Amino acid sequence: MWVSDEFPQDVEELWPRLLSESRRHGLIPFLCLPDAMGRPCDLDHVDAVRLEEVLATDFAAYRRRRLPLWTDTTPAPAPEGVEPWPHDPGPPFEQWPGLAPGTPLASEGPTPEVAASSVLAGLIGTGPYGLEDCCLVLVPASRSSEALALIGWSAKAPLPLLCALLRSWEDRFGAQVVAAFGSELHVSVARPLVEAEHASRLALEHVLSTADNIVDDPPTPFPEYATALVGRTSWSFWWD
């Protein structure tokens, strides 16, 4: 793969062209810290993930672990003068509900390339800590969901599971990996969720990615997190 020496100053103009040409030259653009690239994860390990089966098992374990917290409405102790964190009732499911239905293609909607470019522009505009230390990486991949596996992203995320989720989100929601710095991952969404009734299922998929910021940091009631996914065109994840 090709790695730039530093953060490209013209990346906002370069990015859309690289994405539009990616099918021809087979290189997916991706922003990443140089020291976050490690041993590549074989895509066979991603292919081997049976997503529905794995998530069903993971949800059962997650529910057993968290159920006492969801059923105990006693406010957690908080320092004087600090509002206690709101109670989290957890997901409204006793068993794995299945993957959230995807959002259909629409002729008037943005393409994944346009959505990814917009998220990149937003990141550059806000300038989060660590972004300026990223390099532009051109990853030899057929789709963006393979990028993290092929660079061997060194965060604490479970790479095969995460890449399998990203692949599924790419198919269902037009998701595109844009940047990873520190332990943060930023993903664009070209076809965001529009049906509120499916929000809890998608939110549960986010929870089962094992990312630490989903409902836990800062503490966010699951229903509140789920509701916020409707119409949202970017997703962020981080692992402690």
Image (tube, rainbow, N blue to C red):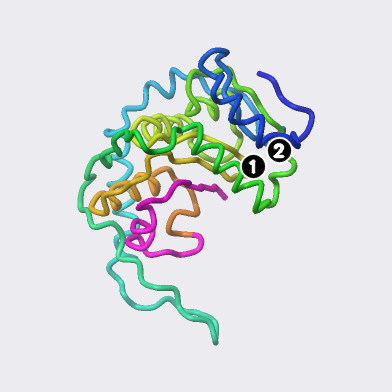
Total marks placed: 2
Left or right placement of residue 44 versus residue 138 in this view: left
As drawn, 210 above or below 106: below
Q: Position of residue 182 (x, y in %)?
A: 65, 44
Q: Amino acid at mark 2?
A: Cys
**Quarter residue 134 falls in:** top right
Q: Nearer the viewer, residue 73 or 187?
A: 187
Instruction: Give me the residue at 36% from left, 63% from top.
Output: 224
Marker disc for residue 134: 2
Q: Tell which circle, 1 or 2, labels the residue nearer the N-terminal end.
A: 2
Name the residue beneath numbered marker 1: 181
**Quarter residue 161 falls in:** top left
Q: Amino acid at mark 1?
A: Phe
| C-beta proximity under 8 Å, tags 1 and 2 | yes
**Is 224 in the magenta?**
yes
Q: Which stretch did the figure color magenta? A: 217-240
